[in-house]
């Protein structure tokens, strides 16, 4: 499912126009991004939680040449599915 299909599904499920569903989805994405940038955790009970994790610097290998390369440390977004989401998928 891509963003346009998600907007269509949200509009149909909530009885909103596609424009309103797009605004709601963009608002959710912006609010979640802002919270994660500031180091907060975003928890949606039953759905899951988004958090930031630190990935340390490490040495990698270029698969084409075999040459070692240094991979810089960075922050990554993690998502942990909630119980209700996990149960509905299984």
Image: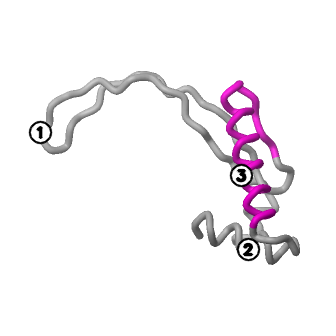
Give percent across and percent down for residue 55: 50, 28
Query: Which quadrant of the figure has residue 40?
Result: top right
Q: How many marks?
A: 3
Q: Is residue 83 above or below residue 38?
A: below
Of badges 3 and 2, the one in the foreground is 3
Residue placed at 29% from the left, 23% from the top? 70
Give percent across and percent down for residue 51: 68, 36
Q: Which residue is mark 3?
A: 26
Q: Residue furthest bottom?
A: 12
Q: Which mark is residue 9?
A: 2
Q: Quadrant of the C terminus?
A: bottom right
Task: Please state which of residues 5 and 65 is positioned toward the viewer in this rendering.
Answer: 5
| Disc nearer the start of the sequence (3/1) | 3
Residue placed at 39% from the left, 23% from the top? 72
Q: Is residue 54 above or below residue 33?
A: above
Q: Find out whether residue 15 is within the magenta segment.
A: no
For the residues labelled 3 and 1, the Cα–Cα distance comes to 42 Å
Of badges 1 and 2, the one in the foreground is 2
Q: Which residue is mark 1?
A: 65
Residue placed at 83% from the left, 75% from the top? 13
Of badges 3 and 1, the one in the foreground is 3
Give percent across and percent down for residue 4: 62, 68
Would you call the spot at circle 2 few (<14 residues within 10 Å), some (14-19), or many (20 or more)?
some
Query: Which quadrant of the figure has residue 50?
Result: top right
Q: Which residues, given as a range, are shown in magenta?
A: 19-43
Would you call the spot at circle 1 few (<14 residues within 10 Å), some (14-19), or many (20 or more)?
few
């Amino acid at each position: 499912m891509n963003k346009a299909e998600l907007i269509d599904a949200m509009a149909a499920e909530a009885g909103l126009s596609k424009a309103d569903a797009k605004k709601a989805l963009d608002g959710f994405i912006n609010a979640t991004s802002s919270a994660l940038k500031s180091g907060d955790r975003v928890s949606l009970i039953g759905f899951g939680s988004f958090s930031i994790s630190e990935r340390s610097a490490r040495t990698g290998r270029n698969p084409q040449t075999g040459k070692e390369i240094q991979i810089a440390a960075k922050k990554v977004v993690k998502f942990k599915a909630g119980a209700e989401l996990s149960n509905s998928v299984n």
